[in-house]
Image: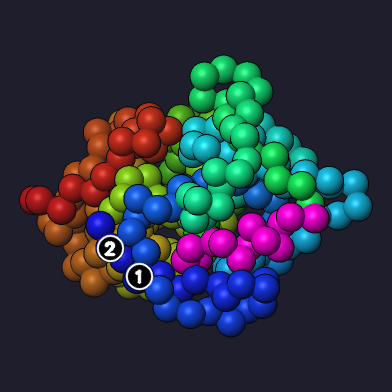
Amino acid sequence: MLRTWLVPATGGNHDCEEQTIDKADTITLWRPTGQAELDLVEASGWREWPPRLPDQPIFYPVLNRWYATKIAREWNVPADGVGYVTRFEVQREYMDRYEVHQVGGRDVLEYWIPAEELADLNAHLVGAITEEADYRGPVGDQEFTDAHHTLGRTLPAAWRTYLQGASWFRRGWITGEAYVWLNTPREMLELHHAWHESTDLHPGIAIIGGDGSREQLVLDLRSDPAPVLLVDITSSGWDNAIRQADDVDELIDRIEAGTFDYDFDD
């Protein structure tokens, strides 16, 4: 498959030139990324990895999303409260000079790029660095207390357990097509306020997430268990809602398994 990519010109500067590169000529790599590093990647226009610090002699990209996710959740989130999974493409011919290191189980695979060679690696990136997922640390008790007082209803225990776990999926791509953004209770109340009278048209609503655009993932707290429904921001009532999961436990299981996708059929 031929695709057109913006490829950084050799020399490591920010100028890009348009080239047509066969996807088979690139390799997909992943990296668990902390907030400070992601901010520097964003400042580069998502085109470069920042130079290593003096105590960071090696740059470690990994070969699959599972391994990057494991590190982001088990290391970055406890250390910083947030961990990102990023994805990027590199010219395969360039990466052939490096050995793949298996540092654990079968899928625990990574490259070891010396810090002094990182600028050269950046020169062989194909396309932009992409944020694939964002994981967060536990949400405080006060947010759930405030939500309970405002809603007059309690959010499902499974939802509280998930958001107060060691790490939870904040936002990102579940499948190639499904982008999910989950809300903390505080963000949920802010959305309720922004909806104004639309919230009144959906009694018992709790906006727990969405697709980052028009579609909202909501709970109907009038039922126990509360079903997970999809509601457009222009919805005039519950009659327009589309069921996505029987309860929040099912939603969490499908997000964690990487199998969730939106159902747009009535």
Give the CA distance from mark 2 to mark 1.
Answer: 6 Å
Magenta part, dominant SS? helix
Mark 2 in CB contact with mark 1 (< 8 angstroms): yes
Dividing the picture into quadrants, the one containing residue 119 is bottom right
User: Is 83 in the magenta?
Assistant: no
Towards the viewer: 231 or 251:
251
Nearer the N terminus, badge 2 or badge 1?
Answer: 2
* x then y, percent, for residue 262: 24, 49
Q: Residues within 10 Å of mark 1 (few under 14, many from 20)?
A: few
* x then y, percent, for residue 18: 42, 78
Query: Relative to 196, does residue 144 appear above or below in the rendering?
Result: above
Residue bearing mark 1: 20
Quarter of the N terminus within the rendering: bottom left
Q: Residues within 10 Å of mark 2 (few under 14, many from 20)?
A: few
Q: Residue at x 33, y 59 (%)?
A: 22
Give the farthest residue toward the right. 54
User: How did the renderer colour the structure?
Assistant: rainbow
Dividing the picture into quadrants, the one containing residue 214 is bottom left
- The three-letter amino acid code for the residue at tag 1 is Thr
